[in-house]
Amino acid sequence: MDYSVLKTEIDLPAYSGMTDQQIMNALNDKTIAAYIDVDPLDIEAYLMLYDLWIPIKEGTSLASKKTVEAFRLFKPLSFSDPVKRVKIIQILDGLVTDVTTPDFTSTHKDFILAMADSFISRADELGLPDVDLTDIQNAKEYV
């Protein structure tokens, strides 16, 4: 545990008046929206369930080719990287508008994007493991 980081955090005004238990909960509760990386194989499996992967994989349209190449090159698909996230969204938008993949809809796009949605804790954000009451007490005594 990095007590200097934890002490700096719990000394913030947001934690004043809180009990140690409340501070621990505030640090460990996963309430901060974040993106996680997604394995392209998980997306391919989803697309297979809806009979979409083979038409995309064997497609000759630019949208199909971009999708296959993105899945091949970006392992995992890093939705947390804003540049890559924008590109992935553009690629999925291309599939939605591609006349050769008419069964790929915005609903499929939204489901794929939701695979990357997650929540993290403030401790995660600070690079700390889950905080326990002993950690809070040790951080308060840290000089």
Image: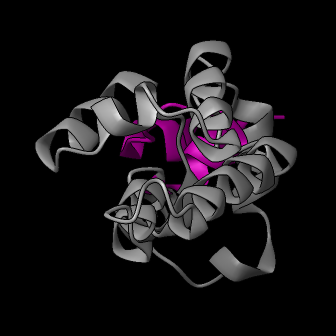
Figure check: 107 above or below 42? below
Residue bounds of the magenta highlight: 117-143
Residue drawn at (67%, 50%) of the image: 91
Please provide percent x and percent y for residue 100: 47, 54
User: Magenta span has 34?
Assistant: no
Q: Residue at x 35, y 23 (%)?
A: 41
**Residue 84: which quarter of the image?**
top right
In the rendered view, tell whether residue 90 sits above or below residue 62.
below
Left or right placement of residue 116 versus residue 14 in this view:
left
Front residue (pair 55, 25): 55
User: Does residue 133 appear to the left or right of 68 in the view shown?
Assistant: left
- Residue 49 in picture, x, y percent from top left: 12, 43
Left or right? Give the position of 138 relative to 62. Answer: left
Residue occupying the point 48% across, 59% down: 113
> Visible in this render: residue 39?
no
Front-lying residue, 131 or 36: 36
Where residue 98 appears, as percent x and y from the top left, is 57, 61
Q: How is the image coloured?
A: one colour
Q: Is residue 122 magenta?
A: yes
The outermost residue toward the left is 49
Instruction: Identify the residue at image location x=56%, y=38%.
Output: 64
Quadrant containing the N terminus is top right
User: Is 94 rendered above or below residue 134?
Assistant: below
Quadrant for the C terminus in the image: top right
Whether residue 53 is visible here, answered yes or no, is: yes
